[in-house]
Amino acid sequence: MERNAAVELLRIAPLVDELADRFTAAGYALYLVGGSVRDALLGRLGNDLDFTTDARPEAITAILTGWAEAVWDTGIAFGTIGARRAGMQCEITTYRADRYDRASRNPEVTFGDTVQGDLARRDFTVNAMAVPLPLRDLLAGSSHQPLDHSRLIDPYGGMAALARRELDTPATPEESFADDPLRMLRAARFVSQLGFTLAPRVRVALGAMAGEINRITAERVAAELSKLLLGSNPRAGIELMVDTGLAQHVLPEVPAMRLEIDEHHQHKDVYTHSLTVLEQVIALEDGEPDLVLRLAALLHDIGKPATRRHEPAGGVSFHHHEVVGAKLVRKRLRALRYPARVVENVAALVFLHLRFHGYGSGEWTDSAVRRYVTDAGELLPRLHKLVRADCTTRNRRKAIALQRTYDDLEQRIERIRAAEDLAAVRPDLDGNAIMELLGLPPGPDVGRAWRYLKELRLDRGPLSREEAEAELRRWAQENLPE
């Protein structure tokens, strides 16, 4: 790890040492701290850097002025000032020594006097390390040499915990989680992002204190949940949340999918199936991690518990679970204060994910294919991935058949797309043409006529102008007053 850190710190040393020299000249100490030290040791340091200092916020601002390209108040009441220079983004926070009322996430903000005191209030030991600056005093000058870690400030064994990939807390986990219950969800996020496991005492405390997460605002919970889902192994993070009871307070619909299965009513384990779909949809991503797609994969079957029915002849049905699921998705994601676009996109994918199973062996008409494409709209590429990921079965022959059937549907979509503009299925006459042809003023009748032409377009494909006008006149004679 020391060699990883040397490589990473040498990369940022020129800019960081400039900054450190300004703090030293002003009579203050500066340390690289927390996640930045952890990520440097892991060899994954980005361009967002965290620092701590004994300078107060006003002094930090003065030091940064004239050096940074931009300076902003990230949370001056909490002692944090942000800055940007040469592609690096910095957050510099005054040593903290907060006290908490343990009833809300409202610390009485007090500034500390030592870096050791600041590290004591941090969430996990792997984040409770600091590197004194400037870096020139710490590095041997070559990326081939390990970091001289004798000067690394690590009072709680963070480096050893990092080597074990273990999350433990500087104080007792009960104290740490009582100070900020969001740390419980952050633990699950680190399991997903970094492949950590929890120290036994941390896992016990998380299970005992899971309900404390209800003290945290929905926006902060959603931010951590999103980071968890965007990690490299979100299944592990979700499983930790479910097993400790944390999910019952954050995403209760997920543990609810652990339906009891008996020998007389065989069906898939919905919870395990959903986690498998999540893993499979990640394998189909072709770029950056996709939060909407991952949420849809995890939640696509949350309507099943409410719709489960044991059939008289044996077996289990979940009729219309996609309809119920879409409603539950909207309710939960709105409660978590996700953006409206995220909510609607995830709900739409959940609603549409079963549509393909009516395709059978390709007996859909071209009209049905057009409707599938039009209903999905810009979500079609995501819907393709979700449906393919959802084709899970222990029967390999059946799984291959499902994938081939979806191949056929995609090929039909492309054939029709080549002949028609499926990206913008609109009536063959616009509103102005409708009003002119029928002699209508603006109003609801124009909208009704437009919708009729759109349905006709979906059913029959593009019409010539003459055909569209003839159909519109026929509709008007039957549906509009004389």
Image: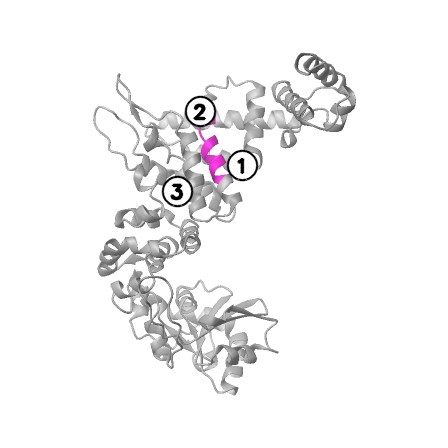
Residue type indicated by callout 1? Pro
Residue at 25% across, 66% down: 172
* Secondary structure type for disc 2: helix
Q: Residues within 10 Å of mark 1 (few under 14, many from 20)?
A: few
Magenta stretch: give its range. Answer: 345-357
Q: Residues within 10 Å of mark 3 (few under 14, many from 20)?
A: some
**Total marks in image:** 3
Is 122 in front, or is 157?
122
Tell me if 165 is positioned left or right of 69 in this view: left
Residue 381, which numbered label? Answer: 1
Spatial separation of the CA atoms under disc 2 and disc 3: 21 Å
Above or below — where is 188 with respect to 61? above
Is 481 in front, or is 277?
481
Q: Residues within 10 Å of mark 2 (few under 14, many from 20)?
A: few
The quarter of the picture where residue 70 lies is: bottom right
Spatial separation of the CA atoms under disc 2 and disc 1: 17 Å
* Secondary structure type for disc 3: helix
Is 372 in front, or is 283?
372
Q: Earlier in the sequence, mark 1 or mark 3?
A: 3
